[in-house]
């Protein structure tokens, strides 16, 4: 009996706490598959954020450290500098990376720390109840913007990849989405590229992943995938935003 | 040919697999798991092993094996 697809070894056999249709589960699986393919499970150290993915250490079958809210790139920097032979990645959401952790991510990118950052952008604060995040679309309804986000008072969504692309230290910036199987496979390739950039000591890389949040978008899981294609991807352009590694 | 194994305790019934299966073989059943989610069921006898369902599954609830069940 040959397996065509089996759960990756880098993922524990636990039931996740994520809502039905949440993109975090897909991103966890993609990271675990890439780690298995590169055979680096014994070397990898992940750094988990505060946010919906705060319990990521329950699901990954390798070492994971926990950081204070938004400080994941700073903790990853310390781990990587102390243990340069280990592969270190930071896993963050948009409330974590684009709001409270703006300083840490900008300076980690500017110093071109040799770490990989996986940034799950679902345009809301999930764990705290669906409040507006810096990445929320204009007009998007959230708990704190009940009549839609207004540009006049709250600004426009932050495009993190474009923001970091002006920094010389940011070597590889990619934005993908989880809306279709082909987009998911492109995200997996970007995650693999990001790890390989770190293994070859080329510097800082970040993969932004546009991810569905059916619960706080008030949609069914399938409607939330359509919402990504019809609304989010009009604001957040997919593809390689920057690549100076080649 | 291949066959599909579903971990019903992990499934949350999001329906992503129902949407992508080229054989339309997945259905959301009336069966509930211990968390109270309506779990998916595989209705076709044979699977072509394209792995689209496992690509989209957020909960790693589907595994595919070669051969007959």
Image (tube, coloured by chain):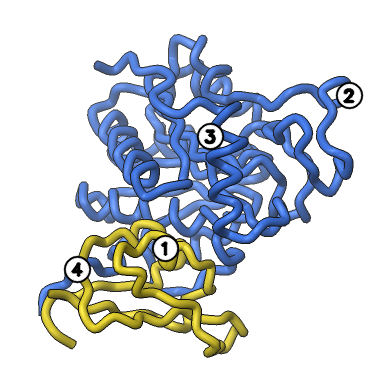
Chain colours: A blue, B yellow
Residue at 41% x, 82% y is: B41
In the picture, measured across the screen, residue A239 lies left or right of residue A159, that is left
Tell me the mark number nearer the camera, choosing from 2 and 3. 2
Residue at 48% x, 83% y is: B9
- How busy is the neighbourhood of tag 2: few (under 14 within 10 Å), some, or many (20 plus)? few
Q: Position of residue A208 (x, y in %)?
A: 49, 35
Which quarter of the figure has residue A94?
Answer: top right
A82 vs B22: above or below? above
- How busy is the neighbourhood of tag 1: few (under 14 within 10 Å), some, or many (20 plus)? many
Mark 2 near mark 3, Cβ–Cβ under 8 Å? no
- Are discs 3 and 1 located on one and the same chain? no
Mark 4 near mark 3, Cβ–Cβ under 8 Å? no
The quadrant of the image that shows the N terminus of chain A is: bottom left
Disc 3: which residue:
A73
Q: Position of residue A160 (x, y in %)?
A: 58, 25
Disc 1: which residue:
B57
Inter-mark Cα distance, 1 to 4: 17 Å
Q: Secondary structure at mark 2?
A: helix
- Are discs 2 and 4 located on one and the same chain? no
Residue placed most toward the observer, A37 or A103: A37
Q: Secondary structure at mark 4?
A: loop
Q: Mark number for residue A183?
A: none
Chain of the residue displaying label 1: B
Residue at 84% x, 28% y is: A150
Q: Secondary structure at mark 1?
A: loop
- How busy is the neighbourhood of tag 4: few (under 14 within 10 Å), some, or many (20 plus)? some
Q: Secondary structure at mark 3?
A: helix
Disc 4: which residue:
B48
């Amino acid at each position: 009996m040959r397996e065509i697809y089996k759960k990756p070894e880098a993922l524990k056999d636990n039931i996740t706490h994520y809502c039905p249709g949440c993109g975090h589960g897909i991103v966890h699986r993609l990271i675990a598959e890439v780690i298995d393919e590169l055979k680096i499970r014994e070397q990898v150290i992940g750094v988990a954020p505060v946010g919906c993915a705060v319990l990521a250490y329950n699901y990954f079958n390798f070492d994971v450290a926990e950081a204070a809210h938004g400080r994941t790139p700073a903790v990853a920097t310390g781990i990587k500098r102390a243990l340069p032979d280990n592969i270190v990645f930071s896993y963050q959401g948009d409330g974590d990376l684009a709001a409270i952790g703006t300083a840490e991510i900008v300076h980690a990118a500017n110093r071109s720390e040799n770490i990989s950052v996986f940034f799950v952008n679902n345009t809301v604060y999930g764990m705290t109840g669906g409040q507006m995040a810096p990445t929320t679309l204009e007009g998007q309804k959230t708990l704190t913007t009940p009549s839609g986000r207004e540009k006049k008072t709250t600004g426009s969504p932050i495009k993190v990849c474009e923001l970091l692309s002006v920094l010389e230290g940011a070597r590889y910036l990619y934005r993908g989405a989880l809306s279709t199987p082909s987009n998911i496979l492109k995200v997996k390739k970007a995650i693999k590229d990001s790890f390989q950039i770190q293994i070859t000591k080329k510097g800082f890389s970040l993969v932004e992943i546009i991810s569905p949040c059916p619960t706080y978008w008030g949609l069914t899981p399938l409607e939330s995938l359509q919402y990504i294609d019809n609304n989010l991807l009009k604001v957040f352009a997919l593809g390689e935003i920057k690549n100076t590694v080649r | 040919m291949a066959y599909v194994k579903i971990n019903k305790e992990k499934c949350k019934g999001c329906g992503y697999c129902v949407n992508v299966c080229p054989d339309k073989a997945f259905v959301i059943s009336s069966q509930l798991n211990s968390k109270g989610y309506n779990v998916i069921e595989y209705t076709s006898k044979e699977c072509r092993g394209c792995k689209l369902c496992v690509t989209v599954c957020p909960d790693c609830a589907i595994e595919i094996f070669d051969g007959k069940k």
